[in-house]
Amino acid sequence: MSSSSVTNTLTFRAGPAASAAEIIDMIGADGYAYVDGIPNDFDHLSLLSLIGIPVPQYQGELVRDIKPDPQMQEFEVSALNMKPLVPHTELFEFAGLPPRYIALWAVVPAHGPGGETTLTDGYELLRTFTPEERAALEAREFEWRSPASLTAEGVQRAAYHPIAERTPWGTVLRYSGREMRCRGLGGEYVDDPLLTEYRDRGLRFFEQACHAVKIARGALLVWDNWRMYHSRSGFCDPRRHLRRVMLDQFGAGDANELSRAG
């Protein structure tokens, strides 16, 4: 994988409102922001609540622990094991709009090689398609399903969405290297040239252009889930422990299925 180190770094300010405003500005410009210098006892959720509305996650929690679970190691793809992840956006398998922002901070960073969160700009990928192809990405709907690792947690969802969806708050891009499918007229899964090209071009683009971020203890990484594809490199340290929060954009929460359910 050809990746570059994170450059969008902010130093934490004592006033959360000032840091929140800087984070929002940086995400608007570049799609993500990394904040270091945060005190060990800091309430990350209080800062993130100034950026967006916290969304209940799969088991109803606002803050989800992301750390290796031996029972999840058998799955090829899971946030809860130590294997590399495939590039994706979050919550594409739910009806409505996905959360606008995803945030991670480290309780215990991974020691040794690996464990970086990797990000690339999906809007830049979208610009590589022709106007006719972009129109098709907006017009056609595909099936998006929960991965097997979430099914094991009792989460088994599917929804139909376009790849690119225009909203009053901006364009939503959805992406999965594994869980987006096309059904034929008889309901069977079929190969689709547009979907295959989007998936394969996205994987190549991610390999070439991703930014790698190894989150330090207490530091915070926030990105635009409508714009950025993300992944994770494999690692060997079972003590790695991150926490994750998902945020709706202010004003867009009623269009998110998890927000309605929560």
Image (cartoon, rainbow, N blue to C red):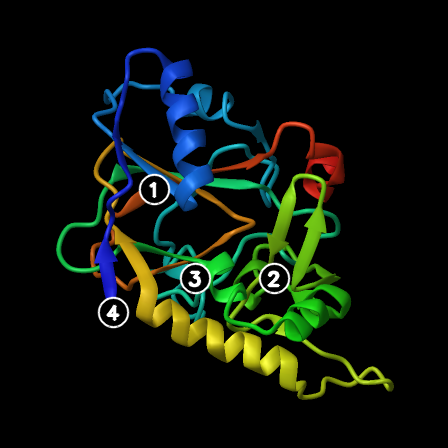
Q: Secondary structure at mark 2?
A: helix
Q: Of label 3 and label 2, which has the lower sequence position?
A: 3
* Amino acid type, label 2: Thr
Q: Secondary structure at mark 4?
A: loop
Q: Secondary structure at mark 1?
A: strand
Mark 3 neighbour class, 10 Å CA radius: few under 14, some 14 to 19, many 20 or more: some
Query: Which x, y percent locates residue 215?
Result: 26, 43
Of labels 3 and 4, the one closer to you: 4
- Nearest to the observer: residue 253 or residue 205: 205
User: Quick one: which residue is furthest to the front in this view?
Assistant: 131
Instruction: Answer whether residue 84 is visible to the viewer in this image.
Output: yes
Mark 4 neighbour class, 10 Å CA radius: few under 14, some 14 to 19, many 20 or more: few
Say which residue label 3 marks.
Answer: 72
* Amino acid type, label 3: Met
- Nearest to the observer: residue 78 or residue 205: 205
Say which residue label 2 marks.
Answer: 151
Say which residue label 1 marks.
Answer: 242
- Nearest to the observer: residue 42 or residue 137: 137
Alpha carbon distance from label 1 to label 4 = 24 Å
Alpha carbon distance from label 4 to label 2 = 32 Å
Image vertical order of residue 19 relative to residue 125, above or below: above
Q: Of label 3 and label 1, which has the lower sequence position?
A: 3
Alpha carbon distance from label 2 to label 1 = 22 Å
Query: Which x, y percent locates residue 4?
Result: 23, 58
Query: Which x, y percent locates residue 191?
Result: 67, 88
Residue 2's disc is: 4
Q: Where on the picture, by quarter, is residue 205?
A: bottom left
Q: Secondary structure at mark 3?
A: helix
Looking at the image, residue 71 sits to the left or right of residue 180; the answer is: left
Q: Where on the picture, by quarter, is residue 179?
A: bottom right
Looking at the image, residue 193 sits to the left or right of residue 15; the answer is: right
